[in-house]
Amino acid sequence: MITISTFNIQNDINSYNNKKTDIILSYLKENKIDILGLQEVYKPLDKDLSNKLVNYTITGKYRYLLNLIFYKVNEKTPIITRYPVISTHTYHLPSLFSLNRIVTKTVVKIDEKMVSIYNTHIDFMYDILKQKQLKKILDIITNDSNPIILMGDFNLKNNNPIFNKFVNELDNLNIRHLDILEKTFKKSKYHRAIDHIFVSKEIKLVSKKLVTDIPISDHYPIIIKVRF
């Protein structure tokens, strides 16, 4: 069984202390998570995570090369995994009017099988950018012959036509959406997720849940358990 989680940990760089890192590490350990996709990871937290992780690899690059200029918003969408990492690459998504957006791809080896993991955080303001960013992600995945795990903060609910079109396009690639049916952004008025996980249909869902007792973010993490 494989345990997978996606978690937007909230960019609170101005008030950061390493207790937040310790809580994330405890979350990882207590839930026996094999693959964790984080969003809004900033430099100090990333550094502490990298120094304290044991038996895990963290992958992914930042939005911007010029860290001094973009320090507070220079986030990454890392993938943390206990599986052997075969390759990793960070793709930039179309970003015309807003912050740079990225998707991290990491290929791991699970029981002699190559699996591609994708983690992203798309634009929260402009529908035109959301469409372009989803198309870019779809184009990347279309050319990937490995089983797929896609997760992240999509800033789109499951009643949004843009999102549903993306869900249908992934379904045509034999990748299904695992809808959590609850809100993942704490301040939302509606019981609809904006954080999502997709998996290839050959990956069998065992369970899924929302974790609501972690106080370090304005999002709730999702945990799923799957089998091949």
Image: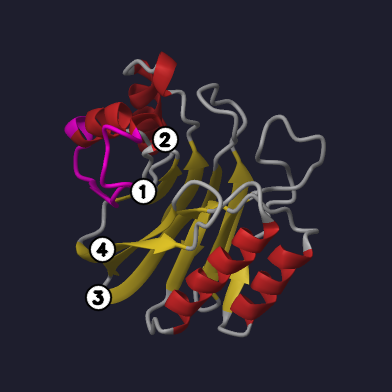
Q: Earlier in the sequence, mark 4 or mark 1?
A: 1
Quarter containing the C terminus: bottom left
Is the residue 21 above or below the residue 201 in the image?
above
Query: Residue 131 appears in which quarter of the rendering?
Result: bottom right
Residue 1 seen in the current view:
no
Q: Is residue 53 magenta?
A: yes
x, y (%) of residue 163? Answer: 70, 64
Quarter containing the N terminus: bottom left
Q: Nearer the viewer, mark 1 or mark 3?
A: 1
Location of mark 3 (residue): 112
Is the residue 204 above or below the residue 35 in the image?
below
| Residue at 69% from the left image edge and 58% from the top image edge | 127
Residue 148 seen in the current view:
yes
Q: Nearer the viewer, mark 4 or mark 1?
A: 1
Is the residue 1 above or below the residue 221 in the image?
below
Location of mark 2 (residue): 73
Q: Earlier in the sequence, mark 1 or mark 3?
A: 1
Q: Which residues are magenta?
A: 51-70
Instruction: Measure how far apart labels 2 and 4 are at the Cα level.
Output: 22 Å
Location of mark 4 (residue): 88
Instruction: Measure how far apart labels 3 and 4 are at the Cα level.
Output: 18 Å
**Three-letter amino acid code of the residue under disc 1:** Arg
Instruction: Measure how far apart labels 4 and 1 are at the Cα level.
Output: 15 Å
| Residue at 50% from the left image edge and 31% from the top image edge | 10
Magenta stretch, main secondary structure class:
loop
- Rate crowding at label 4 as few (under 14), some (14 to 19) or many (20 or more) other CA atoms within 10 Å: some
**Three-letter amino acid code of the residue under disc 4:** Thr
Q: Nearer the viewer, residue 218 or 75?
A: 75
The numbered disc on residue 63 is 1
Query: Residue 102 appears in which quarter of the rendering?
Result: bottom left
Callouts 1 and 3 close, C-beta under 8 Å: no
x, y (%) of residue 86? Answer: 20, 67
